[in-house]
Amino acid sequence: MNFTRRETLALGVGAAALTVLPFRVHAAADEAIAAFTGGAEVGEGGIELTAPEIAENGNTVPIGVSAPGAVAITVLATGNPTPGVVTFNFGAGAASQAASTRIRLAGTQDVVAIAKMADGSFVQAASTIKVTIGGCGG
Amino acid sequence: MASGVKPRVKVPKTAAAGEAITIKTLISHKMESGQRKDKEGNVIPRSIINRFTCEFNGESVIDVTLEPAISTNPYIEFDATVPEAGEFKFTWYDDDGDVYDTAKKVAIG
């Protein structure tokens, strides 16, 4: 196989883009993200996901999300049998667009939080959580 | 699962007008995910609380959609503003159609 100079360059750029991508998201999670955002572009920043680096027990992993100015925040576990975890919709009485809860994780994976801002834009944050014992036992 | 479900909520009894308070809620529920199997290999059917709402004097504070990935005895913590004396109303919706609710009064002081 002979590559032209142009093709080689394109390959190089593609490979670089793949390694630079901050996290890998599974297909089911991609669909869940699209369902929440409606296919809109998802930016970075303005949202914080608080999660432990290592969770000994996947049955109860404490997480917190905070996104000032958000109307809704959804949390997705990309490595779970079903990626959806929780969606917080904030009303007028909420003092801050922050909430925390405890979730189940099947194994070591990336957890993604996506916030829908008041202006209709979307931002996301992700965090890798190492799980020692999975929380979806059979 | 109508038995053994007990909602617990922690709200300060008094707050300054306009103050932001932190509310902690917990409800005892097994949150069966629908992924587990019993000894015979049959899937245990899903039975979870799928929605939780909090209102203050009829105004929505938070509306949460819960999925099977929420732990047993779902715990939710959030912040609310107290503009005046009133009552927080908490409601949990079960998969089997049951609704559990509780209320807490807050005074200005």
Image (cartoon, coloured by chain):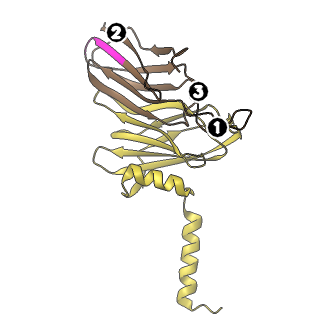
Name the residue tied to disc 3.
B72
Q: Colour of chain B?
A: brown
| Distance of label 3 from label 2 (alpha carbons) | 27 Å
Tell me where the magenta segment starts and ends, as one range.
Answer: B84-89
Q: Which residue is drawn at 64% across and 37% down?
A: B43
Q: Give me the residue at 58% from left, 78% from top.
A: A12
Residue type pointed to by label 1: Val
Please give the residue where the numbered disc 1 appears in the rendered image: B43
On what subunit does the disc labeled 3 rest? B
The three-letter code of the residue at mark 2 reads: Lys
Q: Is mark 1 on a helix, strand or loop?
A: loop
Q: Nearer the viewer, residue B95 or A37?
A: B95
Q: Earlier in the sequence, mark 2 or mark 1?
A: 1
Question: How far apart in space, not on screen, are marks 2 and 1 (Cα)?
Answer: 42 Å
Q: Is B63 drawn above or below residue A122 in the view shown?
A: above
Q: Residue B56: where, in percent of width, then height?
A: 30, 19
Give the CA distance from mark 1 to mark 3.
18 Å
Marks 3 and 2 close (CB-CB < 8 Å):
no
Q: Mark 1 lies on which chain?
A: B
Q: Quadrant of the C terminus of chain A?
A: top right
In this rendered view, identify the residue nearer to me: A13 or A60. Answer: A60
Of residues A62 and B31, the one nearer the viewer is B31
Chain A representation colour: yellow
Q: Say which residue appears at 59% left-offset and 65% top-offset.
A: A19
The residue that label 2 is drawn on is B105
**Three-letter amino acid code at the position of disc 3:** Thr
